[in-house]
Image: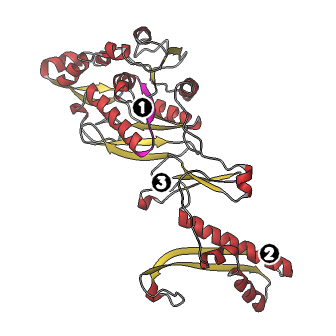
Amino acid sequence: MPSERIEFAGSLGEPLAGRLDTPDKRPHAWAIFAHCFTCSKDSKAAAYIARALSEAGFGVLRFDFTGLGGSGGDFANTHFSSNVDDLLAAADWLREQHGAPALLIGHSLGGAAVLAAAQRVADCQAVVTLGAPFDPAHVTQQLGEDLQVIEAEGEASVSLAGRQFKIRRAFLEDLNGQPQADRIRALAKPLLILHAPLDKTVNVDNARRIFETAVHPKSFVALDGADHLLNSAEDAQFAASLIAAWSRRYVPAAAPAPQVSASEAEQGVVVVSERDTGRFAQVVSAGRHQFVMDEPLSVGGDDDGPTPYDMLNAALGACTAMTVRMYARRKEWPLTSVRVALVHDKVHAADCEDCDSREGKVDRIVRVVELQGELDDAQRARLIEIADRCPVHRTLHSEVNIVTRAGTL
């Protein structure tokens, strides 16, 4: 599945590092994945679930909170509220660049964050938590004896998951001031709660409290045998399959790319529609054939397909090769293969000896036709002449009337 690195501004003004996982075709919906406390977007759970969801047709944005993973900023200056605001910034970026964040997914403290943020994301249609605490302050249980040091001295360097993190008193005060029960009760969105019964980090009783506090529609599924971090690919993929199946009831699928009917195909109709991935990507439907067109990275595209001018060159090149092949076959000449290379450019009219225009710039396509086979000079010269007679070549050199109107064909 395609996976693209992205970056956007977080709640504290620092650049946040993200990754966009998309299916090969147009996503039927967009989701955001929020990682666990002190984890990153590249944790096993985040990567496994994002990839599995993309295989199920979702586009998934996973990102690092401020001060974690590849994101900028100092973790010591962050707190739960800034994480929620980072999540809102991710939703804004996804909405602007690709599509509505219809599904919010959060793991552990990330699950608490999506519960806190969901009401502020108007286009969110459903929420999923994995191993989430009922109260964000639950994470203080991981601080051990350092908790007293933070409260007494204002900050402490704490070892979590083998790494050192500086945590300040403001972080604890922010956690203790969260009205999480009220948020869960007022969620008013479909909620799926996934939790491992033997979770040793966040006891499964947290899932019970979330479920009892939330209003319907709500669902709870036990991730039997899984650990808190979903380190097993099998467990993460099972969770992803549950999310994909459950969310289809609540998350409306994006309209599929328009297909060309049999009657339209007979008329030569080609349909182009936005793919909803990246800034420019388009899905082209021509009869039973479908492919993607895009722009290169250098002009802000994602390079997921050939450019419009690439396709123009391809049309001319394919038509040239077909026409030459048809002529050689009819003449029974020993042409073994045809290769056509083309380059499109814009040049100053004054530099173009064969152009009628003498001012401004004109389009120029340089076409090189390579003929393989035991052909004599006369046969080669004739086939090059025939190349200029291909229908697309003639169309490009003739007057073309393009009629544009609103509506449907």
Q: Earlier in the sequence, mark 3 or mark 2?
A: 3
Which mark, residue 123?
Answer: 1
Distance from the alpha carbon under mark 3 to that under mark 2: 37 Å
Residue 117 lies left or right of residue 215; in this view the side is left
Distance from the alpha carbon under mark 1 to that under mark 3: 23 Å
Residue at the spot x=65%, y=72% of the render? 317
Please name the amino acid that badge 2 sits on. Met
State the extent of the magenta-drawn residues as a range.
97-107
- Dot 2 crowding, Cα within 10 Å, few <14, some 14–19, many 20+: few
In magenta segment, residue 98: yes
Instruction: Give the structural element (helix, strand or loop) at label 3.
Output: loop
Which mark, residue 326?
Answer: 2
Depth order, front residue of 353/299: 353
Q: Is residue 328 above or below residue 233?
A: below
The quadrant in which residue 368 appears is: bottom right
**Residue 339 horizontal/vertical position (percent):** 68, 74
Residue at the spot x=37%, y=13% of the render? 185
Residue contact between numbered discs 3 and 2, judged by CB atoms under 8 Å: no
Depth order, front residue of 81/284: 284
Distance from the alpha carbon under mark 2 to that under mark 1: 55 Å
Q: Earlier in the sequence, mark 1 or mark 3?
A: 1
Which mark, residue 275?
Answer: none
**Residue 386 horizontal/vertical position (percent):** 73, 82
Please name the amino acid that badge 1 sits on. Asp
Residue at the spot x=64%, y=56% of the render? 270
Depth order, front residue of 365/15: 365
Instruction: Give the structural element (helix, strand or loop) at label 2.
Output: helix
- Dot 3 crowding, Cα within 10 Å, few <14, some 14–19, many 20+: many
Please name the amino acid that badge 3 sits on. Phe
Mark 3 lies on residue: 280
